[in-house]
Every structure is written in structure tokens, then in C-alpha cells.
Image (cartoon, rainbow, N blue to C red):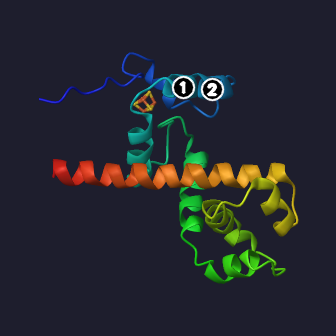
Amino acid sequence: MMATSRPACQDADPELFFPDHELQDHHDRVVSAKSVCSTCSLNVACLGGAILRRETEGIWGGYTPAERFALLRDTRRLGREVGFAVQQLDRGNPYRVRPDDLLAVVHRLSLRGWTTERLSVALGTTPKAVAKVHQRARAAVACLAAMKNAEVQLDMAA
Ligand code: SF4
């Protein structure tokens, strides 16, 4: 039989992970819950499962509901058809990337070896802004893998 990891929240106060918005220390509780999740060996699977189940409450995998919503939106943006934009930029042609396509364009060009500096020049933005988009793209890629994994686990359990 395979050994299973223990959730780091197993002995924690459940209210930490479902903090009441009315509480004055709501923010502190969220920070504490996230800190527990950051030590949990199951956090990727936990996040993938929560997104797959469309959990609308609580901290799962270190993400609040609003953060999970943003992450899910980024996974969709990652899949946008941006071949033409990528081709134009790769040829050195000026091209105005639509805000909704930015994540996918940065991701695709990074895979082609574009540096943050090169991307920032081509996109007319700062390296810091590009680095942020790149970070979101990486989180979205990891999230897609976690969701896929959670889906496989669910199929196996069915
Ligand atoms: S990642 Fe999930 S299982 Fe792990 S501590 Fe956080 S809520 Fe619990």
C-alpha cells in the first residue's frame, strides 16, 4: 500500500481556513492559514482539487477564493490563440498585444527563449511588469498540471 502524506492542516483550527469576513483579524487568519499551507506537501494537489470542485469558500493550497478565481482565469488566458501575435513579435514587427492575450504571448515567447528584457522592449512595458506576467503564467501552468492530476485521482477513485 502506498504511503500518503499528512495534510499540514490536519490538527489546525478549521476556522483558520474558513475565516469569517466579519472578524477583525480576518487578514491575520488568512496569512496564518497560508503559512500552514506553504509547509504542506499536499498543497499542489489540494489547490488543483479545490479549483476542480469550484470551491467558493476557504483557503485551499494556500489560495483564497479570489486568488483561485484569478488563477483559473489565467489558465484560460494561457490557452488563448496567440499564434499571429507571437509570429509578428518574433519577426521583429511592431504589434500591439491585447491585454487578454498578454499572458499567453509572454509564456509562448519565453518558451522560445526570449528574455524578460527583450519582452519588455517588444511589449513596450517594464521588465518588472513582464516578470509579474511571467510569474502568473508559471502559476497557471502549475495549476493546469495540478487540475489534471486531481482529475486523474478522481477517475481512479470512481
Ligand atoms: S494545502 Fe490543503 S491540505 Fe495542505 S494545509 Fe493547506 S488546506 Fe490543508
State the image coordinates of residue 30 (x, y, percent, origin top left): 60, 29
Q: Residue at x 81, y 78 (%)?
A: 96
State the image coordinates of residue 73 (x, y, percent, origin top left): 58, 61
Q: Which of 63/93 is in front? A: 93
Labels 1 & 2 near each other (Cβ < 8 A): yes
Instruction: Identify the element where label 2 is drawn.
Output: helix
Q: Amino acid at mark 1?
A: Ala
Q: Which residue is mark 1?
A: 33
Q: Residue at x 68, y 76 (%)?
A: 86
- Rendering quarter of residue 140: bottom right
Q: Residue at x 69, y 63 (%)?
A: 106
Question: How much space separates mark 1 and mark 2, taking CA atoms?
Answer: 6 Å
Q: Residue at x 67, y 68 (%)?
A: 105
Q: Which quarter of the rendered image does ligand 1 occupy? A: top left
Q: Which residue is mark 2?
A: 31
* Label tally: 2
In this picture, residue 148 sits left or right of residue 85: left
- Pointer 2 local density, CA inside 10 Å: few below 14, some 14–19, many at least 20: some
Residue 72 lies, with reference to residue 3, above or below; the image says: below
State the image coordinates of residue 46 (x, y, percent, origin top left): 40, 39
In this picture, residue 22 sits left or right of residue 9: right
Residue 104 lies, with reference to residue 70, above or below; the image says: below
State the image coordinates of residue 19 (x, y, percent, origin top left): 55, 30
Q: Residue furthest left?
A: 1
Residue 117 lies, with reference to residue 83, above or below; the image says: above
Q: Which of 19/102 is in front? A: 102
Classify mark 1 as within 8 Å of ligand 1 or not, answering yes or no: yes
